[in-house]
Image (cartoon, rainbow, N blue to C red):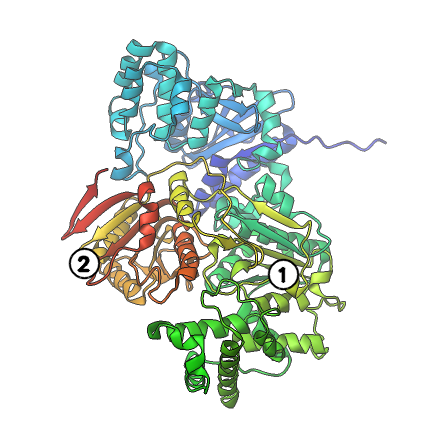
Amino acid sequence: MDQQMETSYKVILFKPFHSAMHQLMRQGQKKIVQAARAAMSEASTDGEIKSLKRTKHGETRLPNVEKFDLGDGYRLIVQLIDGVKKTRVFLFVGSHDDAQRWLDNHKNYKWVRGRNDRELEFVMVSPISHGNDIPVDRLNFDSSDDERAVPLLSHLTEDDWQRLDIPQEAVTLLKSINADSYELDADQIFEDLTERVGDEKASLAIDLLWHANQREWPQLRQRLALISEQADIVAENEAAIAMQAPENSETFITFDDTGLLDEVFERGTLADWMLFLHPEQRQVSDRELRGPARLRGVSGSGKTCVLVHRARSLAKKYGEQVLLVTLTESMRKLLERLVEDLCGVERSRIQVKTMSMLAKDMISDSGQRLTAQSEQIEEAFRAAETVIRNHDDFQRSVLRSINPSKFSSFIRTEISYVRGRLISSKLPEYLEPKFFQRTGRGTPLNQLDRRIMLEGINAYLKCLSERGVIDHELLVSTVIDYIKSGEYQIGRYRCVLSDEVQDLSELDLMLMASMKTASGNEISKVPDGLFLAGDGAQSIYKRGFVLRRIGIDIVGRSFFLKKNYRNSHEILKAAFGLVSQFEFADVDEEKLAKPSMPDFAERHGTKPMIVTCRTAQDEVEYVAKQIYSSLQMGLSPGQICAIAPSPQIRGSIVSALREKGVSTAELRDDVDYESDNVKISTIESAKGHEFSAVYIMGLVDGLLPNADIDVEDLPREASRLYVAMTRAREKLVMTYSLRTGQSASRFLMSIQNDCDEAHYKNGDFRKITA
């Protein structure tokens, strides 16, 4: 008897549908989500949906649309995209009113595919003379007053206007239309355009205005591509094929491609689309590598996402423990959340630790549990300074000429710089310039200077030893010595993946590279063993490394992610303009270069805002009012973050928000983007995170850049501001108040042309016009 073959029909999920399912789960509508999931399963196995009642309204607004009643006033919108193969794309799920609005807003939408990139977009392509077809509900309540005042088509380039091929008077009219004027009188605008350019061009212009008002930037670009014959309207069956192509994995998910959907919809996730990789990211996350590898990537390119996916893949592949290492406690907690969201049964094989946690865990295996407190480290630094200043040759050394106000900072940084590269037994190598090059250190030191400094380092170590404690560098150095001596035999991990590697020291990397697998092989010598991810332009610590000195060979295994997915075009333009003037080390500190130009996201928004406040009190008051207003407009508290380099400013904004009844939490304590707390953070803790709205406060010289820095440290200070700026997806506000003797951060001058500016004084907000 022949075995009956089970027929399988394609079910494809559109991005709005995926997001709507998450929204329903967050609202507690588990029953509705389960009904929609059942419909997906039924369509996948039977090629049709019979278990749900079809409604009779709305099907004519899009071709082959099926609308189903899910019960309790909820509707499911599906399009039969290929009637022969019974392929369906699930477009939307929500309340009856939301479903009606979605259909109204997508009337005249068609599937349009680019000829070069083959990407598919759902685009409004209106019939000629369609003024009465403009949806009645055009309001965009998510936009602020400032955003609504910006002309809708302000992002079009001169080349775009030429492609429209319309008279200058029509261009002038279109350039003047903002959200308010469009929403109040779109029909009249259509009539005015028709008189000037005819029905066909007027319909096109209305389509562009519609997409801009909906902030559908990729669709707007595709609509422009369509008129210049760089894109084509495709039939439904062709669209079904395109939806399953790798270049469209950002927008569509095939139902039978992943077993994660049940867990995703049941639990809700930290970031809806962080679970699904873009094609270029997947090529890296799934790749089999014969040795250590390095992943570089611009801010917002998904390096962390790749790490989490790769960790999951390797845990499943080898069935052994995989370690994710990161820099800060807040980032560790975020990675924990992402691993929880992504993984199934392999979750138990993935551990997430900070570098400090890793070193402490390994030293505890050796029987030692000695760590230093901040006051003990401070005492050791003072002991080092005393020995250096009292040295017999101090008066003859370059050290004597260092500005007294910067002397302590220089000594401490030099000690950390040296000890981050040399294990304790190798410290004498510091005396030989040919063995130890001080790359990036602005003050050159000859052998005499180094000898004096080395005695200071030894005094530092002696002070810690007398108190029976060790700091991070000594902790890591001790573990490395144990491993190299053969005393440390415990091999816990098969693979180690490190995030934010640009801010690790050479000793940190040496430790990870020398760790052993359970079979006794070095992590850096086995396939898929060591994976390093980071971005030199986001370095915020004075550390650095040279891979060849450690013995890590990444030749042929270095990857670069160029596409930014996080920030709006305007935010990234300003942020990149800041760091593009400096050079950074992307792989090795010996190789400095300006950061690579990123591929900007199609998403547009308002320019970042720089606000000058009269007093510190005004600055805090302004930011508190802005955050409170955003919350009143419906923005989730967990999607807002206030960043400040000063603990005093952070404390002040917390107090001001609490007076308004706004709950806050330090980001290192609460990484949940869906919590009821507005996040308060340092720049360091904010690394790796992202928010809808970010407020960066206290941007004056002396705070950022720091008052004690030398010229050679400016790139790193600029990088700190770059990190803070690129945490913002949609809205970025930077503030400062001019206290006595202070001036605005010099970095604000670098980005001034890419930002809007305003004054805030005694409750009065006034924009500065160009």
Say left or right for 574 vs 12: left
Q: Residue at x 70, y 70 (%)?
A: 491
- Looking at the rendered structure, the secondary structure element under dot 1 is helix
Q: Which mark is residue 547?
A: 1
Q: Is residue 624 visible?
A: yes
Q: What crowding class fits label 2: few (fewer than 14 Cα within 10 Å), some (14-19), or many (20 or more)?
A: some
Residue type at mark 1: give it. Leu
Residue 520 is situated, as x and y percent measured from the top left of the image, at 75, 69
At numbered mark 2, what does the secondary structure look like: helix, strand or loop? loop
- Residue 326 location, x and y as percent? 54, 62
Q: Name above or below for residue 649 compared with residue 603.
A: below
In the picture of the structure, the residue carrying the numbered disc 2 is 615
Which of the two marks, 1 or 2, is nearer to us in this view?
A: 1
Q: Given the image, on which type of amino acid does mark 2 rest?
A: Thr
Q: Is residue 413 left or right of residue 680?
A: right
For the residues marked 1 and 2, what is the alpha-carbon distance in whole angstroms? 48 Å
In the rendered image of this protein, does residue 377 appear above or below residue 104?
A: below
Residue at 42% from the left image edge and 54% from the top image edge: 723
Q: Earlier in the sequence, mark 1 or mark 2?
A: 1
What residue sits 42% from the left and 46% below the top? 576
Question: Where residue 517 appears, x then y in whole percent?
Answer: 72, 66
Q: Quick check: can you spot residue 635?
A: no
In this view, which residue lies farthest toward the front?
Answer: 396
Find the residue positioned furthest to the bottom: 466
**Which residue is at the front of the view, 667 or 740?**
740
Q: Which quadrant is the C terminus positioned in?
A: top left
